[in-house]
Image: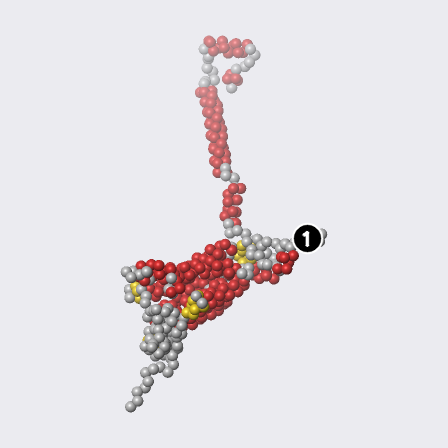
């Protein structure tokens, strides 16, 4: 009876060396992969920024701030989430600065890089959302290249497997970092069995995320940071299930790896942003571009800068950018005509304020005063008329009550005689 061999027929090998000495300088495969990934991200981002109207070379100005900030953020995240290695009972605090020994967290890298990119974009006058959307497909490609460095380091693998793409993992020499431990015959020592190449799963997943962002961004014309949010959702969705497969050391919360919780929370935040934020894709036109130097009139050769002419025209970065619609941007590209700025959004409020200013503020008071005057006039007129009418009525009543043949007293007759002597006839006598 012959037993079937227990050794798999196919497997993925792992490198036995991750560091090469160039004289006194160590060349680390992981660092090379990080650098190549940064270059890939810069090339993709530069291409996409130019298509949005940003001047050539802006990505280098952004990378100067984003890359160091990203490395610092990655290291900080690793140290904060694994404090026992540096500040525990047997920890060495100074090892927190030994970044060449490994220990970078992608979550901190993205957060720190975002802070650096935001600062650089602010200096260049570029909206940060435009930078983030341009970076969205390049960043997962850079992460995919960086995962190759984990393959060289024989790290970030999963549990045991018998699949044809199972990974051989070397036992690394603690006394010779970056090299596999070797037996007496000089052969590298392997871990028993094969393991899931989770670093490879993540690299392939990241390439798929980059393709997804490119396709949906072209179809949906994503803007205002939504392309970057789509990348975050895609990456964290893959990182969630890949993290569950990993077996390397990690801190746990409620029995689950810390990075699993982080992936879930970041995914929900990106999803909320993607759903709530709306708006068209932003395009930019330069503002405040310096004019090209004009040669002096009269042909005075002594005033011409020949060195500048030999060097050729050098692009000058604009002072800033103005956000325009896609149609305005296409028109600007074809004709060079700068579109007129749209009226401010406060026109309606301005019109209301103007109407309120132009409207007589004393109309109500005038109407009240006029009404009061008319009322007083009517009151005064009515009172005078009533008084005059009452006096006349009383006089007529008295005259009617007096008898026609009434004899007046002597003094009254004397008065009447004197009046008659004056030639005036008494009015009451005539009636």
Image x and y of residue 289, in percent = 58, 54
Q: Residue at x 54, y 54 (%)?
A: 320
Q: Specify the farthest residue to the front.
A: 23
Q: Residue at x 51, y 52 (%)?
A: 345
Residue 381 seen by the camera = yes
- Residue 277 quadrant: bottom left
Q: What kind of colouring is applied to the model shown?
A: secondary structure
| Left or right: where 203 falls relative to 424 | left
Q: Residue at x 38, y 65 (%)?
A: 102
Image x and y of residue 7, in percent = 34, 82
Residue 111 seen by the camera = no
Q: Specify the farthest residue to the bottom.
A: 1
User: In terms of secondary structure, where does tag 1 sit?
Assistant: helix
Packing grade of label 1 (10 A; few <14, some 14-19, many >=20) is few
Q: Residue at x 44, y 57 (%)?
A: 115
Query: 213 above or below 122?
Result: below
Q: Nearer the viewer, residue 112 or 188?
A: 188
Q: Specify the farthest residue to the right.
A: 298
- Residue 202 quadrant: bottom left
Query: 29 above or below 92?
Result: below
Image x and y of residue 355, in percent = 52, 44
Q: Nearer the viewer, residue 39 or 99?
A: 99
| Left or right: where 254 falls relative to 365 | left
Image x and y of residue 264, in percent = 36, 64
In what quadrant of the picture does the N terminus appear?
bottom left
How many marks can you see? 1
Q: Nearer the viewer, residue 46 or 303?
A: 303
| Left or right: where 36 falls relative to 92 | right
Residue that carries the numbered disc 1 in the rendered image: 302
Q: Nearer the viewer, residue 106 or 285?
A: 106
């Amino acid at each position: 009876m012959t037993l079937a061999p227990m050794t798999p027929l196919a497997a993925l090998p792992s490198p036995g060396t991750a560091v090469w000495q160039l004289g006194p300088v160590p060349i680390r495969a992981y660092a090379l992969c990080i650098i190549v990934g940064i270059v890939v991200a810069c090339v993709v981002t530069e291409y996409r920024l130019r298509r949005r109207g940003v001047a050539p070379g802006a990505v280098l100005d952004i990378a100067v701030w984003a890359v160091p900030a990203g490395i610092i953020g990655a290291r900080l995240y690793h140290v904060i989430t694994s404090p026992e290695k540096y500040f525990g009972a047997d920890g060495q605090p100074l090892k927190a600065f030994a970044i060449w020994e490994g220990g970078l967290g992608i979550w901190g890298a993205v957060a720190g890089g975002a802070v650096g990119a935001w600062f650089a974009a602010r200096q260049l006058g570029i909206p940060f959302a435009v930078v983030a959307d341009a970076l969205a497909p390049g960043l997962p490609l850079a992460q995919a290249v960086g995962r190759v460095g984990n393959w060289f380091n024989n790290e970030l693998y999963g549990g045991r497997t018998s699949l044809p793409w199972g990974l051989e993992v070397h036992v690394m020499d603690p006394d010779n970092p970056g090299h596999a431990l070797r037996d007496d015959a000089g052969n590298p020592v392997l871990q028993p069995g094969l393991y899931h190449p989770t670093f490879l799963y993540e690299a392939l997943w990241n390439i798929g995320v980059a393709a997804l962002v490119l396709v949906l961004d072209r179809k949906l014309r994503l803007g205002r940071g939504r392309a970057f949010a789509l990348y975050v959702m895609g990456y964290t969705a893959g990182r969630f299930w890949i993290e569950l497969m990993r077996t390397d050391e990690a801190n746990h919360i409620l029995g689950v790896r810390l990075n699993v919780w982080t992936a879930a929370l970041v995914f929900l935040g990106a999803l909320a942003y993607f759903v709530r934020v709306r708006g068209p894709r932003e395009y930019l036109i330069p503002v405040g571009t310096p004019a090209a130097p004009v040669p002096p009139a009269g042909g005075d050769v002594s005033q011409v800068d020949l060195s500048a002419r030999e060097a050729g025209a050098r692009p000058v970065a604009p002072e800033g950018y103005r956000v325009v619609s896609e149609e305005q941007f296409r028109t600007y590209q074809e004709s060079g005509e700068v579109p007129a700025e749209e009226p401010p959004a406060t026109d309606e409020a301005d019109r209301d304020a103007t109407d309120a200013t132009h409207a007589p503020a004393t109309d109500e008071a005038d109407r009240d005063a006029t009404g009061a005057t008319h009322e007083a006039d009517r009151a005064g007129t009515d009172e005078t008329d009533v008084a005059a009418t009452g006096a006349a009525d009383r006089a007529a009543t008295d005259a009617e009550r007096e008898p026609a043949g009434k004899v007046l007293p002597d003094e009254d007759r004397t008065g009447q005689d004197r009046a008659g002597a004056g030639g005036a006839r008494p009015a009451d006598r005539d009636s």
